[in-house]
């Protein structure tokens, strides 16, 4: 292991980590928005839209992220729509993540007891107010374990975006291996920086799970 070389390329991995975090942030944020909308449509069987949501979920979950990103980056350019690699990566992550988030949040919505809904309506809340202040917060609390797992999944899936020349962690690692043949050093830094990203996220998710569990059961 060449530690001098590791110190030399360390700043490149820092920059790549920031790119990975940017991809993760926008991908997760957009997937939560898409997932929430789709979950509501699916749970309440909104006419003329529920079939579209089901088709989207099936298409998204049954096609690889790499294929989706290639379609955005190479396919759309054939019809005159040119997107940069970062934009394609964010859209791909949101498209994939939205379907997983939709199923997670839908499970939370369906788990909210009818008694909670009836109580909210009985005190004078409108259906929208009951949904906003009673149903949705509880649904998100119930869905936290699944949402957290999806967030970690999407953060790891950013490695696929290296295929469209986005300088995230995997791209930099492969570039160093290809140019300088420093496989051990490159893989070592790759593992270290992924741990730096993923471990705090994992700890945060566990903390949120414990907080929601205490709030629910009073433990």
Image (cartoon, grey):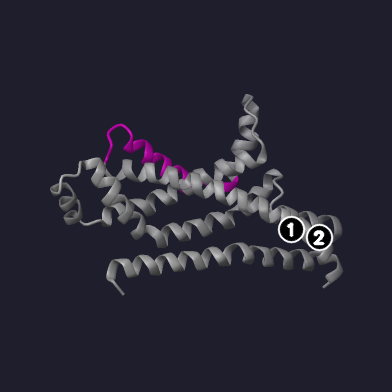
* Residue for badge 1: 13
For mark 2, does the 10 Å Cα neighbourhood hold few (<14), some (14 to 19), or many (20 or more) residues? Answer: some
* Residue for badge 2: 9
Looking at the image, residue 181 lies above or below residue 106: below
Q: Quadrant of residue 219 in the image?
A: bottom left
> Bounds of the magenta span?
45-66
Q: Looking at the image, which is closer to me, 30 or 177?
A: 30
Q: Secondary structure at mark 2?
A: helix
Q: Looking at the picture, how far across and down is residue 171, in whole percent?
A: 72, 52
Cβ atoms under marks 2 and 1 closer than 8 Å:
yes
Asked if residue 50 can be seen in this view, the reply is: yes
Q: Residue at x 64, y 48 (%)?
A: 161
Q: Residue furthest top?
A: 80
Q: Residue furthest bottom?
A: 219
Asked if residue 58 can be seen in this view, the reply is: no
Q: Is residue 87 left or right of residue 178?
A: left
Q: Residue at x 62, y 27 (%)?
A: 81
Q: Residue at x 32, y 38 (%)?
A: 50
């Amino acid at each position: 292991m060449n530690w001098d070389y590791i110190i030399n390329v360390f700043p490149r991995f820092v920059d790549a980590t920031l790119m990975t975090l940017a991809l993760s942030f926008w991908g997760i944020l957009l997937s939560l928005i898409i997932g929430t909308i789709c979950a509501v449509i699916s749970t309440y069987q909104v006419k003329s839209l529920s079939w579209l949501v089901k088709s989207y979920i099936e298409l998204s979950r049954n096609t690889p992220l790499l294929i989706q990103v290639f379609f955005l980056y190479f396919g759309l350019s054939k019809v005159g729509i040119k997107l940069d690699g970062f934009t394609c990566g964010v859209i791909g992550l949101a498209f994939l993540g939205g379907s997983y988030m939709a199923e997670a949040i839908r499970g939370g919505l369906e788990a909210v007891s009818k008694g909670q809904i009836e109580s909210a309506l009985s005190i004078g809340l409108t259906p929208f107010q009951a949904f906003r202040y009673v149903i949705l917060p509880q649904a998100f609390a119930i869905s936290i374990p699944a949402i957290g797992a999806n967030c970690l999944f999407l953060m790891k899936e950013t490695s696929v975006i290296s295929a469209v020349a986005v300088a995230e962690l995997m791209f930099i690692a492969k570039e160093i291996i290809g140019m300088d043949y420093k496989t051990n050093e490159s893989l070592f830094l790759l593992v270290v920086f992924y741990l730096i990203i993923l471990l705090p996220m994992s700890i945060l998710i566990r903390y949120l799970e414990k907080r929601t569990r205490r709030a629910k059961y009073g433990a």
